[in-house]
Image (spheres, rainbow, N blue to C red):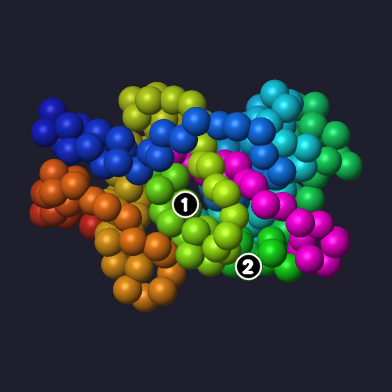
Amino acid sequence: MNIEVIALAQTLWDYHHMNHTLKKSGCIMALGSHDTRVADRAAELYLEGWAPLLIFSGGLGNVTRGVWTEPEADKFARIAIEKGVPAEAILIENQSTNTGENITFTQKLLEERGLECKTFILAQKPYMERRTYATFMKQWPGKEILVTSPQMTMAEYPNEEISFERMLNIMVGDLQRIKLYPEKGFQIPQEMPDEVWQAFEKLVALGYNKHLA
């Protein structure tokens, strides 16, 4: 990766972060994915006392289907229990395949259990904070939402499972969705500075287009 690509990527990385300050909430909800560090972050939040209930949501999505045999939520819950979260503090929704379903299926799960949660801390991948927030605000209005992710820099994030190139393609695709999805009714609109969209266009022109809608 050359210096220009890294600088453009950093612009997107910074924009995708909501930089919310956490406060005590009713529920922590971890959205499933191929990144088990989200489960680590969710467990950390519970063990620090940010909320009394931990919800894991996710079946097998586009990335994990055919790679994992265990639903994302079940895998994440197992990680949390291994880290010391009591099983009775965990709810599992393991049928959803995308962010919208994460929300609607979790709504149904809480209704079935007779539970109401007015405030949520959402745990997600770093480069999906903003899109998760925008989707949740549209699909489940009236809730107070804070979003967080594994606490690491862009340079620290890539690992054996998630290369820098793969991360960057996903970041580019998610930025496009933040721009397009409000018109489709999937998300609330988000203000986007000109320099962020310009970085997106340059990255697409450089070939980082594998995750575009």
Left or right relative to 88: residue 50: left
| Residue 129 point in image, percent of width and height | 44, 45
At label 1, the amino acid type is Tyr
Residue 56 in view of the camera: no
Q: Marks 1/2: CA distance?
A: 14 Å
Residue interval drawn in magenta: 109-126
Q: Work out whether residue 78 or residue 89 is closer to the camera in this orientation and state it.
A: 89
Looking at the image, the residue that sits furthest to the right is 88
Identify the residue under disc 1. 133
Q: Which mark is residue 8?
A: none
Residue 31 belongs to magenta span = no
Q: Quadrant of the image for the N terminus?
A: top left
Does 23 appear above or below 31? above
Q: Residue 96's image quarter?
A: bottom right
Q: Quadrant of the C terminus?
A: bottom left
Give the image quarter of residue 114: bottom right
Q: Is residue 75 above or below residue 51?
A: below
- Up the image or down, 160 lies above or below 98; here it is above
Q: Quick check: is 123 in the magenta stretch?
A: yes
Whole-percent x, y for residue 132 in the image: 47, 53
Q: Which residue is located at x 30 percent, y 41 percent?
A: 15
Element marked by disc 1: helix
* Other-residue count near label 2 (Cα within 10 Å), few / some / many at <14 / 14–19 / ≥20: some
Is disc 2 placed on a helix, strand or loop? helix
Q: Is residue 55 left or right of residue 87?
A: left
Q: Residue furthest front?
A: 142
Q: Is residue 120 visible?
A: yes
At horizontal 55% and vertical 63% (from top left) the residue drawn is: 141
Instruction: Tell me where residue 137 appears, x and y as whole percent.
Output: 50, 59
Q: Which residue is mark 2?
A: 104
Q: Earlier in the sequence, mark 1 or mark 2?
A: 2
Q: Which x, y percent locates residue 87?
A: 86, 40
